[in-house]
Image (cartoon, helix red, strand yellow):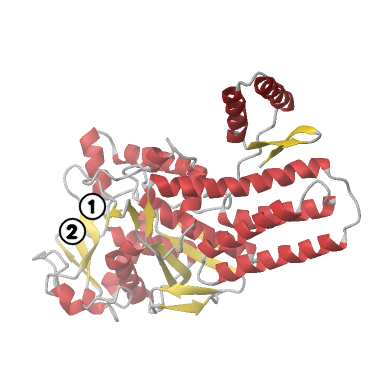
């Protein structure tokens, strides 16, 4: 399997540190608000990567953190006149609801909170101070950027340009404009913890370095997140972690592209900012997951009602194939597999290899979905109530396995009320005899919305799930 490593700007064969074990850390949300469509993309993409590793037989240790102490959380708490813990708990609970709807928790995910690792953070910062890689000023502790080797190697930014002030806020108490906060001295109205430098709280960048080290080790296999985190967040994580430990922090850095809305950057000022709560009013969030996977994760992805409608139609096609196989499983008989069915089974193997080839090529979920569409076409063309039970079960198992890697097809089939359908067919026939073609068409369309297609045959009207 090859993955595009942002650190080297090329695809590389994935080789884990420990055989058949993958240690992954994905930057999670700052819990001061509901997560939006842009937040959802890395969560879905790298959950899918985790699923594919499991499919390939790996044990995966997967961490998605919660930043539960931050300026934004403090500001929101002060605005609402509540404790920061109340804010973070509220939005973590909301996140977990959205995450469940996105099928993000089918496998174990470790969700550490920054405030659970305060002592480890203090110890980490003290280690940097002891190495003269950090210094204290009036209760604040800053990382000394001069202590880092090859600063900018991930984002490819030039340190001299950063120091010139082009991209860094000037702070007179820092030794260099590029130095960044590891520990922040307490301010009035803020939560704080005791430390060797006085009461205060962690800086943002230090949280992820510490939680990754504590839960996964000093060097991990994969660190992932949105492309907007490359600088300064991930760059600073590398600087502080590798300076303290004198070894690589992560062997592979993976970043997903931005999401636009109707071809414009998503922002609150433009009024095109959509939380998952907003999206859920019109679409099952499984549709949003399928939308995110419909394009290669490193490419920009445009969100619009039109595209979501197209994606929903595509997902429905796959669901209909699933429902067809579930219906056939109840109807067909167990009999010897025919020669033609042996060819169908070989074709299933080809579709699986198409799927794996796409996924092995830097998690190309777009092409993997095409392989599933091809398989659905095979199901609709070659498998019917004349097929053997073995072939039906084999197709159903294959479809379930592939779609599980993508985290889709989790809804159960709705029970068809045969009596109600037959009653509607009789009503339709009566309407046609009375030349009430409008009502006849209404009944046909009503059933079609329920994915029930009517077929007029010599033996009478038949129906089938599509």
Residue designated by label 1: 199
State which quadrant residue 189 falls in. top left
- The kind of secondary structure element at disc 1 is loop
Residue at image point 63% right, 62% down: 55
Residue at image point 51% right, 62% down: 366
| Disc ID at residue 139 | 2
| Disc ID at residue 451 | none
Left or right, residue 464 beside residue 240: right
Residue lying at the far left of the rendered structure = 172
Judging depth in this view, the residue of 399 and 235 nearest the camera is 399
Q: Quadrant of the C terminus?
A: top right
Check disc 1: other Cα within 10 Å, few if <14, some if 14-19, many if 20+: some
| Position in image of residue 160 (x %, y %) | 17, 79
Judging depth in this view, the residue of 7 and 86 nearest the camera is 7
Residue at image point 56% right, 68% down: 358
Q: How many marks are shown on the rendered structure?
A: 2
Residue 16 can be seen, yes or no: yes
| Position in image of residue 142 (x %, y %) | 21, 66
240 w.r.t. 65: above or below: below
Residues under numbered marks 2 and 1 in contact, where contact means CB atoms less than 8 Å apart: yes
């Amino acid at each position: 399997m090859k993955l595009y490593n942002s650190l080297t700007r090329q695809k590389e064969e994935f080789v884990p540190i420990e055989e058949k074990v993958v240690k992954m850390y994905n930057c999670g949300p700052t819990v001061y608000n509901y997560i939006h469509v842009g937040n959802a993309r890395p969560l879905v993409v790298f959950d899918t990567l985790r699923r594919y590793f499991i499919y390939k037989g790996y044990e995966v240790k997967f961490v998605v953190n919660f930043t539960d102490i931050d300026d934004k959380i403090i500001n929101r708490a002060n605005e609402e006149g509540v404790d920061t813990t109340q804010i973070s708990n509220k939005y973590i609970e909301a996140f977990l609801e959205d995450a469940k709807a996105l099928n993000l928790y089918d496998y174990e995910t470790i969700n550490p909170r920054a405030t659970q690792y305060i002592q480890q953070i203090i110890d980490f910062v003290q280690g940097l101070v002891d190495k003269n890689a950090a210094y204290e000023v009036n209760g604040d502790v800053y990382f000394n950027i001069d202590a880092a080797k090859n600063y900018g190697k991930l984002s490819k930014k030039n340190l001299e340009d950063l120091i010139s002030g082009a991209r860094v806020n000037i702070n007179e108490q820092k030794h260099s404009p590029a130095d960044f906060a590891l520990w922040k001295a307490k301010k009035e109205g803020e939560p704080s913890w005791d430390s060797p430098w006085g009461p205060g709280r962690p800086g943002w960048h230090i949280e992820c370095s510490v939680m990754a080290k504590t839960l996964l080790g000093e060097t991990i296999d994969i660190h992932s997140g949105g492309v907007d985190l490359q600088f300064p967040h991930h760059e600073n994580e590398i600087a502080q972690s590798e300076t303290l430990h004198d070894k690589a922090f992560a062997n592979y850095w993976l970043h997903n592209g931005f999401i636009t809305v109707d071809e414009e950057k998503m922002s609150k000022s433009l009024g095109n900012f959509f939380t998952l709560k907003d999206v859920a009013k019109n679409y099952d969030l499984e549709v949003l997951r399928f939308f995110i996977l419909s394009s290669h994760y490193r490419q920009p992805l445009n969100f619009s009602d039109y595209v979501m409608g197209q994606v929903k139609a595509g997902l429905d096609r796959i669901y209909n194939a699933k429902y067809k196989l579930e219906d056939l499983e109840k109807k067909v008989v167990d009999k010897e597999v025919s020669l033609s069915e042996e060819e169908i089974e070989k074709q299933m193997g080809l579709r699986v290899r198409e799927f794996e080839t796409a996924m092995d090529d830097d998690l190309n979920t777009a092409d993997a979905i095409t392989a599933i569409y091809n398989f659905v076409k095979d199901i609709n063309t070659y498998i019917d109530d004349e097929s053997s039970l073995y072939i039906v079960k084999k197709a159903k198992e294959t479809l379930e396995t592939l779609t599980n890697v993508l985290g889709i097809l989790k809804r159960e089939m709705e029970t068809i009320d045969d009596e109600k359908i037959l009653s509607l067919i009789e009503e339709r026939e009566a309407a046609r005899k009375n030349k009430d073609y409008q009502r006849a068409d209404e009944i046909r369309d009503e059933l079609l919305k329920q994915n029930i297609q009517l077929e007029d045959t010599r033996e009478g009207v038949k129906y089938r799930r599509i």
